[in-house]
Image (spheres, rainbow, N blue to C red):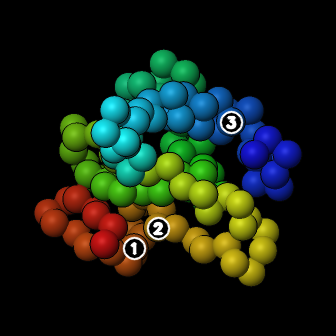
Amino acid sequence: MIQSKAWKALGVYEQSLYLHMKNKFRVNKQGDSNERNISFTYEEGQQLMSKARFIKAIDRLIEVGFIDLVEHWQHSKRPTIYGLSTRWKYYGTEQFKKEHQRTKAKSKTKGHFYGNQYTKS
């Protein structure tokens, strides 16, 4: 992974954040994992870097294919849920699939909204 084009496209903040997110990955004795259920709050991110840098790092990790946005509660105290992704393996190729980004002010995102929650189908 660290020799991949995607990893090399990340800055040190994005790489550090990914490793912290990956550290939350767990597999239980039954083989079930939280691969698509990793929460990371702004408060956790601000322990690592500034809020603005954290937001940019999250967006870049989604853009390059290391994480996916699973649930995003805009304007809520609920944590955003991310999923680990293998899309990074195809970064820079025709097979690479873009993922939905976090909802930003005045942007239109395809997906399902329930109140202020985005969930990927």
| Residue appearing at x 60%, y 42% in the figure | 57
- Residue receiving disc 3: 15
Q: Residues within 10 Å of mark 3 (few under 14, many from 20)?
A: some
Res 67 seen here: yes
Q: Position of residue 93 (x, y in %)?
A: 78, 74
Side of 95 relative to 50 (left or right): right
What label does residue 109 carry, if any?
Answer: 1
Mark in the foreground, 2 or 1: 2
How far apart are the alpha carbons under marks 2 and 1?
7 Å
Which amino acid type is shown beneath numbered disc 2?
A: His
Which amino acid type is shown beneath numbered disc 3?
A: Gln
Side of 21 relative to 103 (left or right): right
Discs 2, 1 touching: Cβ within 8 Å: yes
| Residue appearing at x 22%, y 38% in the figure | 77
| Residue appearing at x 67%, y 73% in the figure | 96
Q: Position of residue 97 (x, y in %)?
A: 60, 74
How far apart are the alpha carbons under marks 3 and 2?
20 Å
How far apart are the alpha carbons under marks 1 and 3?
26 Å
> Counting residues from the N terminus, which is met first, the one under dot 3 or under dot 2?
3
Res 9 seen here: no
Q: Residues within 10 Å of mark 1 (few under 14, many from 20)?
A: few
- Residue receiving disc 2: 100
Q: Position of residue 17 (x, y in %)?
A: 58, 33
Which amino acid type is shown beneath numbered disc 1?
A: Thr
